[in-house]
Each structure stands twice: as structure tokens, then as C-alpha cells.
Image (cartoon, grey):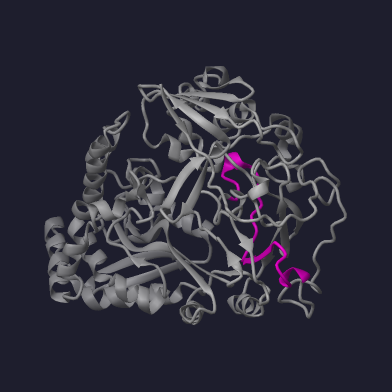
Amino acid sequence: MKKRSTRFLALALAVMMLALTACGGGGDSSTPGGGDKTPATDNNTPGTGSQTPASTEGDTQVFNVSTKSFGNNYDVQDMGWRWMMGDCYEGLYRNVADESGEHFILAGAESVDVSEDETVYTYHLRKDAKWSDGQPVTAHDYEYGWKRLENPEYGYSYASFLYNVVGAEEYNKGTGSADDMKAVALDDYTFEVTLKVPDPTFEAKLVATPCYPTREDIAEAAGDQWGKDWKLCVYNGPFCMSELVEDNKMVWTKNPHYWDADNTHLETINWYIVTEDSTASTMFDNGELDQLQPTGDYTVKYASAAEAGELQRRETDYPGCIGLTFNFAGNDPSGLMGNAKIRKAISYCIDREEIIEAIYGRYKPAYGYVNPAITFEGESYRAQVGEIIYDEYLEYNNNPEKLQALFQEGLDELGVTTPISDITLSFLAVSNASNTAEYEYMQQTIQNKLGLTFSLDTVGDSAMFRSRRDEGSFDIMTSGWYSDYNDPMDFLYTMYTDSYGAMMGHYSNPKVDELLDSLTGETDRAKRLATYKEVEEIILLEDAALVPIYYATKDVFLQNWVKDYRTSSFGASAELYITYIEGRGN
């Protein structure tokens, strides 16, 4: 039996303790746990009135941040507010970013025993973990949460995360029962999971909220309102929601029952709805916000201030890749998308460096599919396998003649005699004020380099986009992926036949499927790495099934009084339990 034991990072910092108030479910109609809390109004919300909040004065452990919208889903099994609520809930593991990079460590569990054949995981839960109403977090909460995820009555989209657990897929698909699912509480603090086959990606998936515990008594009592009414929730993370004013302000307060509360510094986190970048910038300049994630020209402005030492800047990779994909269903308007050379010519027209500099003002150029934030055996996967299409891309990108010749080869293979100048390609995308320049750039670039017509077919919202996408009335469409867990498989499996269907243009390649299937139960890390690379090469070099344009990044600016702020790619957007305030107003 292999035994692993990992504890949280110890913080060698004095904790500023303020008076604690209970937070959690079971309170009055306005605030969980009761209490005399006054909702924010337009007269005292930062950036909208003349009154500066007291929380911007001195070293009170209050953190102020803006966002453009609040979520409305508090159900962790439904992924909830994945990026925000990871600070209010906690699973067996927590994602941590520190000086050595991003990795996951045990959180809700103190240790785990793994069988020699790597199919049985026995988690020993920490006995000091409690919910925000003071009740202990037990193995029964994990068993209920995991079996709830697989319960076919709820239709959770992340149920497949646990399909390798014995009995899980069968239960979810209606051919088995909850009793057959081997994720069980052996006692109050021992949670045992049995896998069908070894799975090196298993632990990475447990960072995601669908695998967090859920209190059966609370969820069942809430019924249809579970996940919809925040006042019905209890939390087992460092913070919990204590106030919500729709479309205005949300407040998190420190969870006094959190097992590591002594090392959680912030007492309050205020989230403000700020829809305009200019307003958020003014608030940040005035010290009303402690953190800012700007775009465009504002990024340039604050980058200069950070270089001068007036602010802090955190630039990190973020596990997403954005670009284009094609209609592989055979009903594309041009009838040309079935040819790889035509797809390559379109892909290589787009100058990644140029579009990032001219249009986005951020991100990294993408010549692969898997984002550099994804690690394999502790090192960036991208750094290990290189940029898949880069060398071939360089041969074509700035050479219109070669691009047109490549496109013509594709036409010849298809038996199409229509001159390139008479060809029209249809591009489907959702249009809004922020992406108009992006689409016009692509239109102009592809038309100029290939000498054809690139028709923009933009729709007003995502529902219309999905409708047009599903009916197949396009040649090329916007596409992308943000990973749910830290392994290349989560990116590459999106291209498995029918795994995401219309979302990936109905791409299918039996060789890709065969290679990904070969990794089931495979524990040889070298073989997994080689197979991942081979799959990515087929997708991008042989099939040109995707047009990767940029790798997502996270660019955060902070006031100098914010200390130990750490981003997270797979849990909360920031691991704020580590953060503290020192020197505000100096």
C-alpha cells in the first residue's frame, strides 16, 4: 500500500484577528446565520457615489474586487461558480500556485492510501474540517455528493468525471444503482474509492467542484431550490457568502469554522458589479479596488505603472486555447471543409503575433492546442513537446503565393475547378462590441492572402450561434476550450468522436479515437506523453482540424498593499485564503 500525506503550506505570518461572526445556512431571510448586515446601496457602493468605503482605510483585512456579473448557481456538482466559489468550498484536494508553479495538494483529506494496482484510493479526512454551521465534514458528505453527481435524475454534465469509478457510469446511465457505485464512507472520516482501471488523471479531476462534498440534509431539504438560493447553502471552505444584492454587491466573510482559519487572513471580500472598464479603472486608481484585470489600452497603462513599482502585476498562463474550427458534418456551404490542405491554408493565413499585438493586447500565440498552463509530471506539457505547427506555419504565413498554392492543391484533390477568386467561405461567430475588430481582422487577412471572399455571418447571442452551429450552416466557426483539470487529456479528448459533437464541428478520426482509447488504464507516463503528442500532431498537422490562435493568460494588477496573492487555474480564480493586506494607504 502506498501512502501519501500532504498538508497545506504553513504561513509564517502573524494573523490579524478581528471579531468573528458565524456564516452559513439556516439563518434569516437576508443573511445566512442571521446578523445585522445592511445591503449596499447606490449611495455607498464604490465608484457610484461620493462616499469612500471604510474598508479602503488602513490595514483592515478587507479585499475589494470588481466583476462584470455574478453567477446564479450554487450547486457544486453542477460546477457552480467554478472560478469564484472554489474559495468558499473545498474538496479532497485544492489547487495551489506557489513559487514552484501550480499543483494540487490534499485539503479536505489529511492523507490517502493508494493500492499497489492504483485502483483503490482510501482518503483519511481531517477531523477538524467543518461546515460553516459548525457541523463536521464527513465521508458521508463525499459519498452523497459523488453519488448525487451520478444520479440520472439531475442530469449533471460533469457526471463523466467519475465514470472510471466502479458502478458510476452504470448508475448515471440507468443500468445500475447508487448502491453499486464504489465511492463509499467506511466510517465518518474514511472515504474509499475503487476505480475500474488505473487512471493517472483521477486525482487532478478531484480539484474540480463536481467532486466536492455536499450535505445531504441541506440539499434534500432545499429540493428544487438547491443551487438556486444562496441562503440555503453551507460552506466548508475558507470563506462563505454572507450578503448578496443582485447586480450590485456580493460579500464573502471568513468562515470561522474552516479548519485552517488561523492562517486565513482576510476577514471580508467585497465583490462589486462594475460593467465598464473605465469605471473599474477609476475605482482602482482611487484605491477603491485592490485588484484589477484590465483589457486593451488599460493593460498597457497599468503595465507601465507596474514597471515603475507603483503596482504589482501577475502574469500567468491560464488553461484555455481559443481559435477556429471547421464544419466536418459534410453540409458546409462551400463544400470545401473536408480537405486538410484547404483547412491548413486558412489556418496559416492568420499571423498569431500580429493579431495579438494589434487586436487583443494580451495572450500568447498558439501553435498547439494544449495550453502551456497544463502540466505533465510537474512540467509544462507544452514545453516538453514543443509547438506542433510552428515550423510548418512559418513556411506559409507571410507567403500568399504558397498559401494560395496550398489551397489550390486542396481544390484539385476535391476535383473543384472553381477559381479561388470566385470562392466564398462562411464564418459563423457571435458578434459584440468587443470582438468586431477581431473578426474584421480575420476577414481582411484571409481575403488578402488567399484571394477569396470571407463572409462574416455574425449572430447576436450564443443561443442563435448554437442553433446555426447545430444545423451546420457554416464553413468555419469560432471555437475554443478551457480545461477542467490539469492534464493534456482534457484538451485532447474534446476531439474524440462524438465527445462534444457540434461544438467541435463533428470532427472524427478513428486513429485519434484508437490512441486515446489506448491510454485507458495506462500508467506508463512516458507512453502517455508520447501518445498525447501523437494525437495533437494528428489533430493539428495531419488533419488541421483546429486553428489555434492564442493561449489564454491571466493578467492581474494589484495594489502594493496586497500581499501573497496567488492565482489558480483549476480551483478558485485566486486562492484568497493566503492573501493579506499590509500597508494600505501608506
Task: Examine the rendering and report whether any part of residue 346 can be seen.
Answer: yes
Residue shown at 46% from the left, 39% from the top: 205
In which quadrant is the C terminus drawn? Answer: bottom right
Q: Is residue 553 above or below residue 197?
A: below
- The percent coordinates of residue 69 (x first, y second) are 63, 62
In the image, the segment drawn in magenta is 54-81
Residue nearest the viewer, comparing 30 with 50: 50
Residue nearest the viewer, comparing 216 with 498: 216
Task: Examine the rendering and report whether any part of residue 483 can be seen.
Answer: no
Q: Quadrant of residue 319?
A: bottom left
Q: Is residue 188 left or right of residue 363?
A: right
Residue shown at 21% from the left, 63% from the top: 390
Residue shown at 82% from the left, 45% from the top: 33
Q: Is residue 208 above or below residue 245?
A: above
- The percent coordinates of residue 262 (x first, y second) are 67, 47
Magenta residue check for 68: yes
How many numbered marks have been drawn onto this rendered protein structure? 0
Residue nearest the viewer, comparing 195 with 135: 135
Q: Is residue 172 left or right of residue 69?
A: left
- The percent coordinates of residue 422 (x first, y second) are 22, 73
Q: Quadrant of residue 125?
A: top right
Q: Quadrant of residue 164?
A: top left
Residue shown at 68% from the left, 66% from the top: 272
